[in-house]
Structures are given as C-alpha cells and as structure tokens.
Amino acid sequence: MMPFSLQRARTEEDAIAAGRAGGRYIAGGTTLIDLMREEVERPEQLIDINALPFRSIRAEGDELVIGALARMAEVAAHPETARLQPLIAESLIEGASPQLRNMASVGGNLLQRVRCPYFRMLDAGCNKRTPRSGCSAIDGINAGHAILGTSDHCVATHPSDLAVALVALAATMRVRGPAGERSFPVEDLYPLPGDTPHIEHTLRPAELIIEVRVPGGAYARRARYLKVRDRASYEFALVSIAAALDIDDGVIRAARIAAGGVGTRPWRMRAAEEALIGKTPDRAAFQVAAERSLQGARPLSGNHYKVDLLPRTMVRALEMAGEVV
Amino acid sequence: MYTVHLTINGQARTLELDPRQSLLDVLREVLGLTGTKKGCNQGACGACTVLIDGKRMLSCLALAAMHDGASVTTVEGLARDDRLHPLQAAFIEHEGFQCGYCTPGQIMSGLGCIAEGHARSADEIRFWMSGNICRCGAYPGVVAAIADAAGSSRG
C-alpha cells in the first residue's frame, strides 16, 4: 500500500474543504482499502467522513430517507425500510456478507468500483484504471460482463445490488459540495462508459453524498429482488432483477423494473415496464415484457447465456412480485 | 504516525500507528494476538472476523487508525479463566473444524450471527454465515455448533 495521510473530518465544511484540496473521502472503506492494497487506488490523502451526521434512517411521509453513512446492515434491518420499501432490504441482504454489510456505507455502496478482474490486474490493459490502455475483457474472460450499454472501451457491469433497487424505485440523492446542494435521480449518478470509462460517476469534485430518498408508490409493497449467481449467497449477480408492481382489480396499473449484472450501469427497463401497463399479471404478459429487456443487447464471447437468463430472471421476479400479498 | 486508542478484549491500549496498518496487522503483529487469522487479506474469506463495538467486521479491511476509541473483541477475549465460551465449547462438541485456520473467524462471526437473531434454523445460519469460508468443508459442524449455542443461550 502506498503511503497516505489520514484526516478525520469533524464537520461537513471540514470535509468539503479537504476534498477541494484533493483528498479522497472514505467511509466503510471495504472497496477502497482493498484496492489500495492492490495499488489500483493510490490516494495521497484520505478524509475519514464517519463522524459526519449522515447516518439516520427515517420516514418523511411515505418517503424513505437513508443517510449516506448508514451501514448496509442498519438499513436492511430498519423497521421503516421493512414498512415502506421491503425491496431495499431484500436487495441489501442479497449483497456482500454480514461482516461487509456491517462496515459498508450506503454512499460507498453506490460508488463501489467494478469487479472486472482486469481492473485489479496491474499488468493488463483496463481503460477504467488507466485511460487508453485498452480493454482486456472484450476478448478475454468476460462471462460476468455486460450485454447492455457496453462500448469498445469497457464492458464491465456495475456491481451494486442496492443501486438496482434504487434505480427501479426512481430514488433520488442529495449531494453537497463547494457550489452548494443539488438533488438528482440515482440513475443519473452512473454515466455510460462510452470512450471515457474512467469517469464512473457524475459527482463533481469534493461533492459529498448526504442522503438517498426513495419515494413511496402503490408498487412499493409488491416488490421483490431476484439475484441469480454462481453460488447461493455472498456472490455478485450474473443477472438480478428488481421488480415492483401496482396491481389493482386484477390489472397492472404501474410497474418498476431494473436489472443488475447485465448493464454497464444499473439498468432501468422502461420498455418492459410500459408493456405491462393495463395487462393481467400472468406469465404470458410477463414474457412479452421480458422480451423487451433485450433491446440493444450485445453479448460477448463468454456471456451469450445472459441473453436467455435476463428475460427468464425477469419473468420469475415479476411472478414473485405478483405473489406478494 | 497516528496515536490511536483502542480497547482490546477489555484492556485499554494506546498505540502509535502508520495509517496503512490494518486492524488485523495491529492485532497480530503489534499486540501478538495471533488468534485472529489472515486468510485472503481482501475481505473475501472471513478468517479475520472480530467484533468492533459489538458488531462482526473484517479486520483486514479496517484501518486501525480509523477506529480510534473503538472496543474490539477477538477470539482471545472469549474464554473466562480456563472456561471456554459456550460457542467455543460447541465447536469442539460438534467438530466444527478440521485444520482450524478459519475457526476463530467462524466463532466471532457466529457470535454476531446469534446476536443479530439469525440463528433460528440451519438454513438461516448457513445464509448468515456465508461470509466465512472453510476449505476443509467443516460446514455441517459449524452450523450445528452455532445452532446449539444459540439454543442454549436462549434457554
């Protein structure tokens, strides 16, 4: 690990001032410390933001408000999460391990780096780690990689399960930085890789995530997260689906669907959502919608299976959501 | 160097540390508490699990200097005099190990699993212990030991 200095921010103003001076924020550290040990990350200054007052989890009306420093385990176990947004709890518990969920913050979860093996391999090309060094995954080991939103420069998936649920639920985030406060959809945090895959988020320099806000909706209770992976727990998704349905009088009024493991960002499935409106919630309708999930799909040498697995996982997730009483 | 105050197994310690030192390396190399094991050193195996302020965490991914003021419990802190903690005794009773290398992490994680209320069935224990890998495959004994200790601590 390269040498660095460590500063504990006492206030938000302290943190942002240190961020402007070039420091990197650290909360749980579960991604950053691992990557620093591999020397993929080489920050010269770390700013420990754990003392900042962004750890509360609360309801404001039917909106769930999650502080950026709340730990994954705290959010998953919180009664307001269970009451307002069970999908959030389910997506959290399907991710990482109990020990990591006790450590990792919500803000850090959303900003975690990709799990492409070449990103960690300093002697392999990776445009995310080293711009213009090439993408080793496109013609290499790519069974776990994306089929949606890829470019000739990067095909890595975003690894967060929580982000998939938040994108499905149209959550927003509040951030504060040197130029003040702003809010935007969590979906907009994630740019497509294009020819600049090293740009992984849309935060401006020194901006801090304050909280995530999940709006309520008639679909929020009838919502499930289905994660398909190589082992039953403690593994990243091959394909995952967050699905939420508003069913009234036997007819789908609204649907919210997002996918993980298949896109270079958490992938909202708007065409599939629209195909469900006004339909009876049955397997035939779910299959029609799921076929629309493949629009623009570009499989790689090792991940053709995702072209089948994605719609099948979506059908099953929609069935699971429809079964919630 | 940074001055860091830690309470390790009930004993207050003041340490001068490089910020790069993980809690795991501080426990093993500075304090000589080698019960906590270094498996993968990248947060994937669970061998380094300790309790930090009562919660199970991975000491390999914790910078000690970021835990100033924290209370840490390691496997060395469980026995009372010559009397093993009930979960330690249950691991022996149910043969919850073979080579033993992952065992301190399994036991510390098992304590967290029980305290969180996730030890109500074998399936639940398996899911909530998935962060601890055992290459010997002693999982049936691990699950039995935790179920036993959880039952006896309820009774």
Image (cartoon, rainbow, N blue to C red):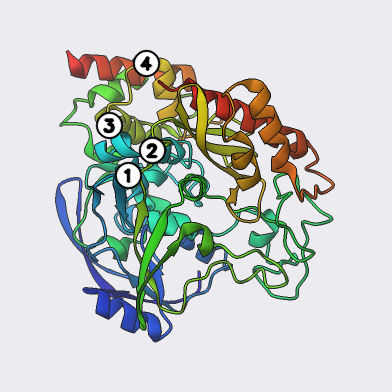
The residue labelled by disc 4 is B121
Tag 3 subunit:
B
Q: Are marks 2 and 1 in contact (CB under 8 Å)?
A: yes
Check if mark 4 and mark 2 are on a common chain: no
* Side of A73 relative to B77 (left or right): right
User: Where does the N terminus of chain B fall, quadrant-wise?
Assistant: bottom left
Mark 2 and mark 1: Cα distance apart in space: 7 Å
Check if mark 3 and mark 4 are on a common chain: yes
Q: Are marks 3 and 2 in contact (CB under 8 Å)?
A: no
Mark 2 Cα-neighbour bin, 10 Å: few <14, some 14–19, many ≥20 = many
Mark 3 Cα-neighbour bin, 10 Å: few <14, some 14–19, many ≥20 = some
The residue labelled by disc 2 is A89
User: Where does the C terminus of chain B fall, quadrant-wise?
Assistant: top left
Check if mark 2 and mark 1 are on a common chain: yes
Q: Is residue A41 visible?
A: yes
Q: Earlier in the sequence, mark 3 or mark 4?
A: 3
Q: Secondary structure at mark 4?
A: loop
Mark 4 Cα-neighbour bin, 10 Å: few <14, some 14–19, many ≥20 = few
The residue labelled by disc 3 is B116
Q: Nearer the viewer, mark 4 or mark 2?
A: 2
The quadrant holding residue B66 is bottom left
Residue in front for this viewpoint, A190 or A285: A285
The residue labelled by disc 1 is A75
* Side of A251 relative to A302 (left or right): left
